[in-house]
Amino acid sequence: MNTKQKIVISITGASGSIYAKVLLDKISKLTNQIAEVGIVMSDNAKDVWKHELGNEDYKNYPFTFYDKNNFYAPFASGSAKYTTMIVCPCSMGTLARIASGISNDLTSRAADVILKERRKLILMIRDTPYNLIHISNMQVVTQAGGIICPASPSFYSNPKTFEDLASTVVDRVLDLAGFEIDSFRWAE
């Protein structure tokens, strides 16, 4: 990668805080590929993180956290040139607001900006099963240029821990985002 990326990570209240933790851990190690990281975390995401992981360690990451309603965050405008946005995990409500173009918080506004600027939006959807509304919203986001990457772990790397299992999805997301990472590769 020739230039460092400016990246937005949004953490919503969907179950799956382990995915967000592993993503933040891995992003922390990619400083040679990243110019800036902005984090948006919903109130529900903070509650779910505390419930699922038993801590508030999200506060310990060296990134800039923005309030969910802070429309003065740099990535609320295309002029800031953030190249990638990852929503991890992505709730179905967040997916629906993005698909409908409803910019009522910083996550949905940033996603709208990323799409309008033809940059990379990756939604790591977590909820199952899907109803037709969810599937239609995934179609709309895909047609608008976004990438739907369900939090469906793979097992061919023989993961040993929950973090290893979450890494199978997070590594795929980081690949989609264009980062050079050391990851299990099929038949290598």
Image (cartoon, rainbow, N blue to C red):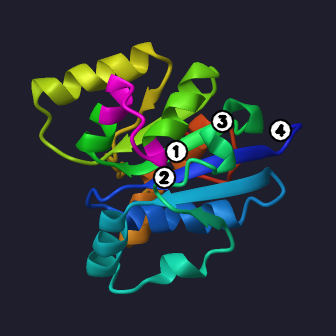
Query: Bounds of the magenta span?
Result: 97-107
Q: Locate the N terminus and report the quarter of the image it occupies.
A: top right
CB atoms of marks 2 and 1 within 8 Å: yes
Q: Residue 1 carries which label?
A: 4
Q: Earlier in the sequence, mark 4 or mark 2?
A: 4
Q: Residue 77 carries which label?
A: 3
For disc 2, the neighbor class at 10 Å (few under 14, some 14 to 19, many from 20) is many
For disc 4, the neighbor class at 10 Å (few under 14, some 14 to 19, many from 20) is few
Secondary structure found at label 4: loop
- Which is more foreground, mark 4 or mark 1? 1
- Which is more foreground, mark 3 or mark 4? 3
Q: Mark 1 points at which residue?
A: 86
- Which is more foreground, mark 2 or mark 3? 3
**Is residue 163 shown above or below 180?**
below
Q: Is residue 121 left or right of residue 155?
A: right
For disc 1, the neighbor class at 10 Å (few under 14, some 14 to 19, many from 20) is many
Indicate whether residue 103 is drawn in magenta.
yes
Amino acid type, mark 3: Ser
Amino acid type, mark 2: Ser
Cα distance in 3D space between marks 4 and 1: 18 Å
| Residue at (10% x, 30% y) in the render | 131
